Amino acid sequence: MNHHVRKLEETEIPSFVDIAINAYPGTMQNTPDFKERFSTMLKTLQENEKSIEFYGIFRGEKLVGGMRIHYFEMNLYSKIIEVGGVGLVAVDLLHKKEKVAKDLIHYFIQHFISRDVSIVALYPFRPDFYKKMGFGYGTKINQYFIKPSSFPSRVNKEGLVFLNETHKELVKECYNQYALSTHGMMLKSNHDVEVMFKNPNKKLVGYLNGDKLEGYLLFSFKKMSETNFVHNNMVINEMIYQNPLALSKLSTFLQSQNDQIARIELTTQDDDIEFFIADPRNGSNRLIPSVYHESNSAGVGIMYRIINIEKFIKQLGEYRFNQETFTLEIDIIDSFIEEQSRKVVIDFNDGKASISQEKSADVKISIDISDLSSLLMGAVQFQKLYQYGRVVVNLEEKVSQVDELFSTLQKPLCITAF
């Protein structure tokens, strides 16, 4: 079945909206009013937001699916690089199981290969589906349900203010400064910041130190009972802090909500929250044998795929892989894009990586592109991949040395939804 993919014309967007509504019935309303508003929003984005485009996949002249493509800037170990993103992948209900989604993702990857981008990312509707297409898992996310009283209140609330649209530039600067120091974070565009102020049900509280915003909370309230109007949770949609004082200020604010809020829903890639709060238990009262108190639920989400390994290694720049010095040959297995199945040799000179033109190597490994993407992004340890049989090493005695090579990589953090 022959498909072709191209950028959608403005007149084609309502047809894509129809397909998207049917593909995501749990999140979209199938009403004339919603369709009109959604179509208008997508048209406006395509016309005015340079970091977003909508593409359709056609069989002949018939639109059978589509996707939203993002042009991101991401922190890769302190260097800002271009990253491709895809979302709102939707297939006409009459054309499911006809490789429409597969062809969309193939086009998405080739689109960014042609733009000389080294890595792309997405949030999977089915992780196993995208794993087969070479996407590797990023950092897991944790959802906590914390009593407000468990947040420490070590400082006063001086400097805390409600933020409004006059603070948009401060919010962008605060977030991007944090992103510039955090591996994996995507920079915010002006559109991203504007969206934060669109929903009247979401509130922004920030800590202003003089005229500088050093941290903020984006949150909303969730009604937890139809019969008890005072039983509500607070949902933290975004929490950014640049230093311990900013975190302490925000924590004091959260602790002060104890009289009105039952639980604070915090979704985060931080694995160490229990060292910050007094009681990490989530209220389920569930014990995990022998005596471990359930604190959070966890899930896989964002996935990465390296699409140009040579460019990716070059973009690492001055990053040091634990001061190791040796040559590593990587036999990359890529069943989705067969031409990317190949061997590359990387020289590590006092930890600095570069592509080698030599054919000989001290160690040789064989690994799927999905796992290699996770490994180089810092989401998984080499030793774990070896133990799980996900990577083959030609010299077993060299496993610990290769593990040391990658041991300093930081886990990527990303709170950008797309």
Image (cartoon, rainbow, N blue to C red):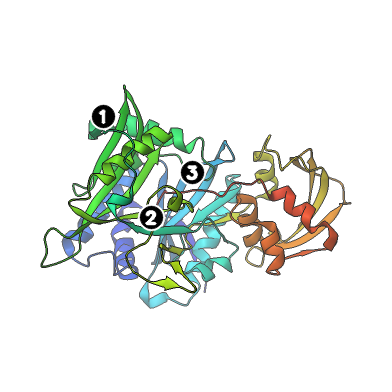
Nearest the camera: 137 or 110? 137
Circle 1 — which element?
loop
Q: Amino acid at mark 3?
A: Met
Q: Is residue 224 visible?
A: yes
Q: Which residue is mark 1?
A: 158
Residue at the top extreme, as displayed: 210
Q: Is residue 46 visible?
A: no
User: Could you classify mark 3 by the number of other residues whose Cα lies within 10 Å: few (under 14), some (14-19), or many (20 or more)?
Assistant: many
Q: Say whether disc 1 or disc 3 marks the residue closer to the N-terminus.
A: 1
Image location (x, y in percent) of residue 6:
46, 56
Q: Amino acid at mark 1?
A: Glu
Give the quarter of the image for residue 371. bottom right
Image location (x, y in percent) of residue 3:
50, 67
Q: Say whether disc 1 or disc 2 marks the residue closer to the N-terminus.
A: 1
Q: Which residue is mark 2?
A: 267
Q: Which residue is mark 3?
A: 185
Identified at 37% across, 58% down, the residue is 144
User: Could you classify mark 1 by the number of other residues whose Cα lies within 10 Å: few (under 14), some (14-19), or many (20 or more)?
Assistant: few
Nearest the camera: 417 or 10? 417
- Cα–Cα span, label 1 and label 3: 29 Å
Circle 3 — which element?
loop
Confirm or deny contact between disc 1 and disc 2 (CB under 8 A).
no
Identified at 87% across, 47% down, the residue is 358
Image location (x, y in percent) of residue 82:
54, 42
Relative side of 282 to 368, left or right = left
- Cα–Cα span, label 2 and label 3: 16 Å
User: Could you classify mark 2 by the number of other residues whose Cα lies within 10 Å: few (under 14), some (14-19), or many (20 or more)?
Assistant: many
Nearest the camera: 69 or 210? 210
